[in-house]
Image: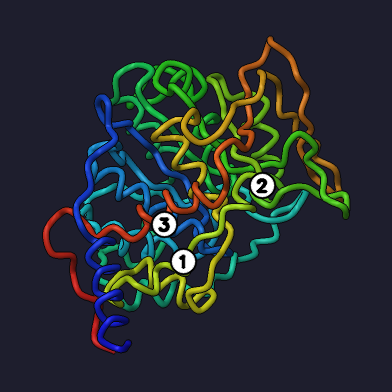
Amino acid sequence: MKPLSSLCRAALLIAAFAPRPSLAAGPPVKVIFDTDMAGDVDDVGALAILHAMADLGEAEILAVGVSSRNEDVGPCVDAINTWYGRPDIPIGYQRGIQVGYPEDTGETIASKYAAAVAKSFPHRLARSSDAPDAGLLYRKILAAQPDASVVIVSVGFLTNLRGLLDTPPDAISSESGEDLVRRKVRLWVCMGGKFPDGRFKDGGGEYNLRIDTRAAVRALSDWPTPVVFSGFEIGARVMTGRALRAVPETSPTRAAYLHFNGLENRESWDQTAVLCAVRGAASYWTESEPGLALMHAGRRFAYNEWIPTPRKAHRYLIEKMAPSEVARVIEDLMMRAPARGQPPQPFPK
């Protein structure tokens, strides 16, 4: 039985890294990806599948912004982008309120993997704070794009989106941040909140919206384009990560999951948002009727409340495809080898 087992393992590796046809039916979706990439590892999986869909011609990655306060996250993002053959993707870093309500505590968001990935894989960004202000970077990127052409997908805190909305007219554009978003952004897909009831048993709300509450209030209240939420309940039933055991050790995605939980499965909150942003919801989920995701910024608890109304352009995803099937789609993308030649090798241990 041992030879057969070896053949099976080889077949799995060949299948995982064999080229697959693109699902792109039109031009690639222009994406700005905003991530905290610190406390959890699904951010890494989300960036990995975004690169995979870019390799398939489905997406164009315009920029990546870091919303957490952690000096290793920017280099980690840079290392992943470099491994996928896109070292020149602009990276931005948060410059806003980060943790605590109502005062900023200055707390760093810890990560089990960001420093390890940055130390093990080639990259150019030395530390997160060496990157430009994310809100200003997004402003520059948007000003150069055609009208109604950009999809922003956020899988972390909303600090950078608040920063973008708050930008004043400048040499880049005569428009305010809100007006620039209104003209250039087609859709914002947000991994955040819980629907339709945003409260957990302890009375608090979902992590991404809760950490920088002021930013969440500003973004949810004032964002001027349609918004689709991939709520906590969507990714919580989509388990991915264990299949990365079949991926070579030269993958930073595999390395991140190894450091985070020993290559066990993890909820796929962030990957679902990216999948929706690039491929749309229809193949995987149903969208709710329009409404408003209202953010309550309590002193102890912050949470979202869903208010159905045809006058607002918020919607949230509702489960349609079996979570196990969505997981297969995500893991297939997470396991893809880069299409842009030979990826750089990790540094010797």
In the displayed structure, does residue 164 sit left or right of residue 85?
right
Counting other residues with Cα less than 10 Å from the Cα at mark 1, is it few (<14), some (14-19), or many (20 or more)? many
Amino acid at pointer 3: Glu
- From this view, report whether residue 345 is shown above or below residue 223: below
Q: Quadrant of the N terminus?
A: bottom left
Counting other residues with Cα less than 10 Å from the Cα at mark 3, is it few (<14), some (14-19), or many (20 or more)? many
First along the sequence among labels 2 and 3: 2
Look at mark 2 in the image and give the residue it sits on: 232
Residue at x 11%, y 59% (from the top left corner)? 341
Look at mark 3 in the image and give the residue it sits on: 331
Amino acid at pointer 1: Glu
- From this view, report whether residue 129 is shown above or below residue 8: above
Q: Are marks 2 and 3 in contact (CB under 8 Å)?
A: no
First along the sequence among labels 1 and 3: 1
Look at mark 1 in the image and give the residue it sits on: 71
Residue at x 24%, y 87% (from the top left corner)? 348
First along the sequence among labels 1 and 2: 1
In the displayed structure, does residue 89 sit left or right of residue 102?
left
Q: Position of residue 109 (x, y in %)?
A: 59, 65
Q: Position of residue 62 (x, y in %)?
A: 31, 39
- The circle on residue 200 is none
Q: Nearer the viewer, mark 1 or mark 2?
A: 2
Q: Position of residue 91 (x, y in %)?
A: 35, 50
Cα separation, mark 1 vs mark 2, equals 27 Å
Cα separation, mark 1 vs mark 3, equals 28 Å
Q: Image quadrant of residue 252?
A: bottom left
Cα separation, mark 2 vs mark 3, equals 19 Å
Residue at x 61%, y 33% (from the top left corner)? 317
